[in-house]
Image (spheres, grey):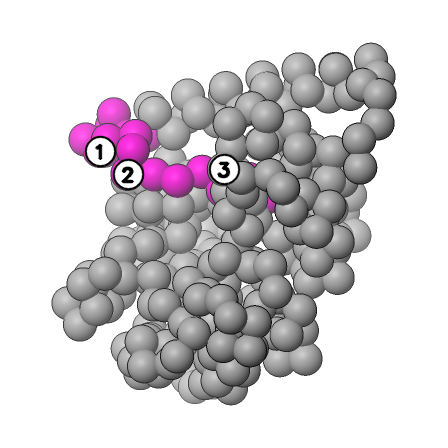
Amino acid sequence: MTSPTSSSDLSRRDEIAANLAAVEERIEQACREAGRARSEITLIAVTKTRPAADVRILSELGVRDVGENRDQEAAGKASECAELPLTWHFIGQLQTNKVRSVAGYADVVHSVDRPRLVSALGREAVRAGRRIGCLIQVDLDPSEGPADGPGERGGVRPDGVLDLAALVAEAEGLRLDGIMAVAPLEADPGPAFARLAEVAEAVRKVHPSATTVSAGMSGDLSQAVAHGATHVRVGTALLGRRKPFVR
Ligand SMILES: *Cc1c(COP(=O)(O)O)cnc(C)c1O
């Protein structure tokens, strides 16, 4: 839908442009410090809870990757923004009953954490005639529950990653792109990201094309870049604080 540009659209655009410039500067700084090239890092703008108008502004400002974590919200936005040159990343925990919908618009799913999800995603990707990139979500919180259950925020334990990666690599309709993690809360993210880098290396040994390491958010993107992240997922620093009741 197009609507006349109002002055509030203009100031929102200015605000997002300024935030984007600041995030860009942080990424460049982190790359300089880590001796990496800026071109090694993809910025994913996390647009959850934000209107399609924000997605449109980001696209006009040159952002090419957006992330969403709830199907109900993402499906509508993706269809409203269908003509924009965007790659859609699904970054939230994914229930099996949402897979058919997600397979219709997501280019990459970051939250693959169990065999049932792999089979459902593969089936629906084939059905939709699409190929979906998959990242194995790694649970980096050592303090959590039983060794084989998914962690509170989703994710498979580091020692379960290779088995799940093999399933994705064999599945028709899916492409194993790499791994993803959210650093545990209230801790220095460095050790967790270092552990993630080890897992990434183990995966690349078996699957050389699975090079994506999705790690780092508004608060810890520099540490993630220092530890080899190829994709950072940034919401708050680009679009402002979300209301507290939504993740
Ligand atoms: C919301 C979210 C982000 C973005 O977090 P910010 O702190 O707002 O940058 C990144 N990754 C995941 C999985 C998220 O759910």
Across and down, in percent, residue 56 comes to 66, 33
Residue 64 is labelled as: 3
At 76% from the left and 40% from the top, the residue drawn is: 51
Name the amino acid, label 2.
Glu
Q: CA distance from mark 1 to mark 3?
A: 21 Å
Q: Is residue 200 visible?
A: no
Residue hosting label 2: 40
Which quadrant of the rendered structure holds the N terminus?
top right
What kind of element bears circle 3?
loop
Span colored in magenta: 30-48
What kind of element bears circle 2?
helix
Tell me, yes or no, whether the two marked residues, 1 and 2, touch with CB atoms within 8 Å.
yes
- Quadrant location of residue 232? top left
Left or right: 108 as drawn, with respect to 160: right
Sequence-wise first label, 1 or 3: 1
Name the amino acid, label 1.
Arg
